[in-house]
Image: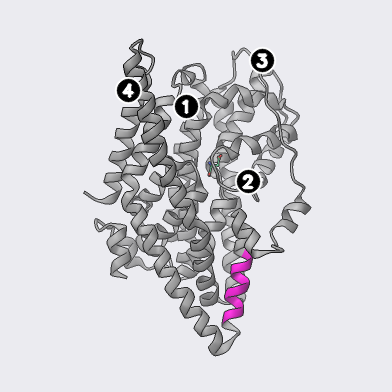
Amino acid sequence: MTLSTKILLGMVLGVALGAVLNILSASEDFFAANVIAWLVDSVFDVVGRIFVASLKLLVVPLVFVSLVCGASAMGVNARMGQMAVKTLGLYLLTTAAAVTLALAFANLIDPGMGIEMSTAANYEARPAPSVKEVLINIFPTNPIKAMAEGNMLQIIVFAILMGVAIIHSGDKGREVLSFFQSFNEVVMTMVSFLMHLAPYGVFCLLAKLFSELGISAIADLAKYFFTVVLVLLVHGLGVYMILFKLLTRLSPWTLLKNVRPAMLFAFSTSSSNATIPVTINVAERRIGIDNSIASFTVPLGATINMDGTAIMQGVATVFIAQAFNVDISLGGYIAVILTATLASIGTAGVPGVGLITLALVLQQVGLPVEGIALIIGVDRLLDMMRTAVNVTGDCVVSTIVARSENLLNEEVFNEVSDRDEYQAGKAD
Ligand code: ASP
């Protein structure tokens, strides 16, 4: 069995067992209820959390070390600027397309028509950071603090500076670079170890989640839920793949197969940030993207590119507007597109962050933020799906950029590996 198949199996079994436990835990039998509670709390929760913690543990070292190597391979020159502009442009463009698609579908399907707005709705919005603050915050005052806080944009800035300084430091620089290159290899091997444990980690994460998830909430919000799912599918399998085919002339099917492990991790952890180590591994070792591209585009994408999240926000805005009987004008729609596209910049890809930025979008068009309480019931499940789309988007854009810079190894790309990532890491 390939690793992806094993992870998929872990996911399916975890969801199935969780759903069964969910039903059984309602049983009158005191003994059964206690055994289930123990299993969920003391086994699945513990293993699942250790698994996610181990993934997160690798994010900062990997992003930093890998980007220092990447930046020193690329150097500060016109080419780097061109690559950065292309990446940013594609990230923003795909996100704007995602919200637009979501608004169009939501207006066709009318998910919020006939919804009785619950007056008990209660949700507190956080104040939005100003653009000025976001910009200043990209620059670290203390690199250790940036790393301790996992502030991705600040880490990216520091790593690029370091990488560039290395190439301007002659022999001494070369020594430091060689250390970083070896360190990068070691961290990648750690990622490979962890990927091997993924089937079990994913199984426990999902068994715990589904044993507690009230699936019944979906019934009340079916129209909203399935509209989001539909747009996620159209964007992930339609828009991305057409864009990919047009811009790279490579097979979208092969890309999807290569990206699969990252999608599965994203789905299981609901966090693009925690998935970064796997996404970098997949980008370099399965898709064939050069380190100088992937080390920049992947962590940047995990932070600023959230198409799946933007889709949820587009549909949710229309849903809440309909539930509260508010008409959004064309100007309002444009404001939604702009805010949803920009809101994701500077917010890390962690579980549930999409709801927080949704508050900004709602405020922008004058909708009651309490509306978020209406959709919170199904958000956990949607978070998993949209995170998979977010990470797929990062991989698609990274591949397009790498291809345009002639830094994509087509041999690796086409050799859809039956070999797993662990062996791939070793072979290198
Ligand atoms: N969980 C998503 C991510 O990490 C963000 C969100 O939509 O809440 O990409």
> Which labelled disc corresponds to residue 226?
1
x and y, in percent, of residue 58 in the image:
47, 57
Asked if labels 3 and 4 touch by Cβ distance under 8 angstroms, the answer is no
> Which labelled disc corresponds to residue 120?
3
Question: Dot 3 surroundings within 10 Å: few (below 14), some, or many (20 or more)?
Answer: few
Q: Which residues are magenta?
A: 157-166
> Residue flagged by tag 4: what amino acid is it?
Val
Quarter residue 254 falls in: bottom left
Label 4 or label 1, whichever lies nearer to me, is 4
Relative to 33, say whether 195 is above or below. Answer: below
Relative to 8, say whether 154 is above or below. Answer: below
Magenta segment includes 87: no
Relative to 176, say whether 229 is above or below. Answer: above
Q: Is residue 98 shown to the viewer in this render?
A: yes
x and y, in percent, of residue 292 in the image:
49, 70
Q: Is residue 206 left or right of residue 85?
A: left
Q: Which residue is mark 4?
A: 20
Q: Which residue is mark 2?
A: 344
> Which labelled disc corresponds to residue 130?
none
Q: SS of the residue at dot 2? A: loop
Residue at (27, 62) in percent of width and height:
423
x and y, in percent, of residue 302 in the image:
54, 52
